[in-house]
Image (cartoon, grey):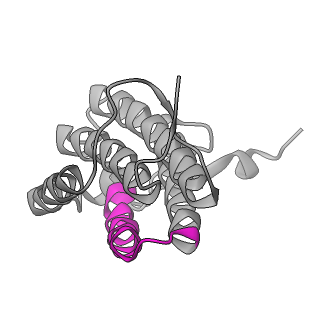
């Protein structure tokens, strides 16, 4: 059996919480998403994708700190929406379901997108608990869409239709 202290952690505000609390699930999932985004960045062949992923990683620290410090700003959402528009204009969106993973870069982006979607679900839970703002949920939602667009860009339109 674990000692009581081993099952607890501190938030950025210094509050003691269980390691399996909704707070720690959220922060851990955002951290996991950031790791996969970094992995996708390392394997990316597209400079615009790499540059954008690095900026996303920097902003994810504010997203992860949101329950403790509320560091995410409206400007962060505006930046993300601008990137979504840029990538929408740079890719052809399929009209059918496609297999997204065709190489290392698209596979890592696909996993990153799935983890971001999980982080979004965790953020919804915290939003309902009054611990994060709707801005956080919206940011993560748009990030998962941006990652989808990046997969399309990285894959250069060559995907297997289902």
Between 109 and 114, the residue placed more toward the observer is 109
At 64% from the left and 48% from the top, the residue drawn is 8
Between 149 and 155, the residue placed more toward the observer is 155
Image quadrant where one finds the N terminus: top right
12 left or right of 5? left
Quarter of the image for residue 53 reads: bottom left
Compared to 31, does 4 lie above or below? above
At 29% from the left and 39% from the top, the residue drawn is 93
Compared to 8, does 39 lie above or below? below
Give how far across and how far down residue 142 sits, in percent: 26, 44
Q: Which residues are magenta?
A: 43-65
At 40% from the left and 56% from the top, the residue drawn is 64
Q: Is residue 16 visible?
A: no
Q: Is residue 6 visible?
A: yes
At 61% from the left and 37% from the top, the residue drawn is 20
Q: Magenta stretch: dominant SS?
A: helix
Give how far across and how far down residue 105 sits, in percent: 56, 60
Please say whether residue 64 is one of the residues in the magenta stretch: yes
134 left or right of 123? left
Of all residues shown, which one is farthest toward the right?
Answer: 1
Please say whether residue 119 is one of the residues in the magenta stretch: no
Quarter of the image for residue 63 reads: bottom left
Give how far across and how far down residue 98 sits, in percent: 48, 31
Between 16 and 56, the residue placed more toward the observer is 56
Quarter of the image for residue 131 reads: top left
Give how far across and how far down residue 85 sits, in percent: 14, 53
Image mark count: 0
């Amino acid at each position: 059996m674990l000692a009581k202290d081993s099952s607890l952690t501190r938030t950025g505000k210094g509050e003691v919480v269980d390691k399996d609390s909704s707070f720690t699930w959220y922060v851990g999932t955002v951290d996991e998403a950031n790791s996969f985004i970094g992995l996708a960045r390392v394997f990316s062949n597209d400079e615009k994708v790499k540059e954008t992923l690095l900026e996303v990683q920097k902003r994810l620290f504010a997203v992860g700190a949101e329950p403790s410090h509320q560091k995410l700003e409206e400007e962060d959402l505006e930046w993300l929406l601008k990137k979504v528009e840029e990538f929408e204009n740079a890719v052809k969106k399929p009209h059918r379901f496609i297999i997204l993973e065709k190489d290392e870069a698209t596979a890592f982006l696909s996993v990153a997108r799935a983890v971001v979607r999980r982080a979004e679900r965790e953020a919804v839970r915290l939003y309902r608990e009054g611990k994060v703002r709707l801005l956080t949920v919206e940011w993560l939602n748009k990030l998962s869409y941006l990652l989808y667009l990046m997969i399309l860009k990285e894959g250069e339109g060559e995907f297997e239709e289902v």
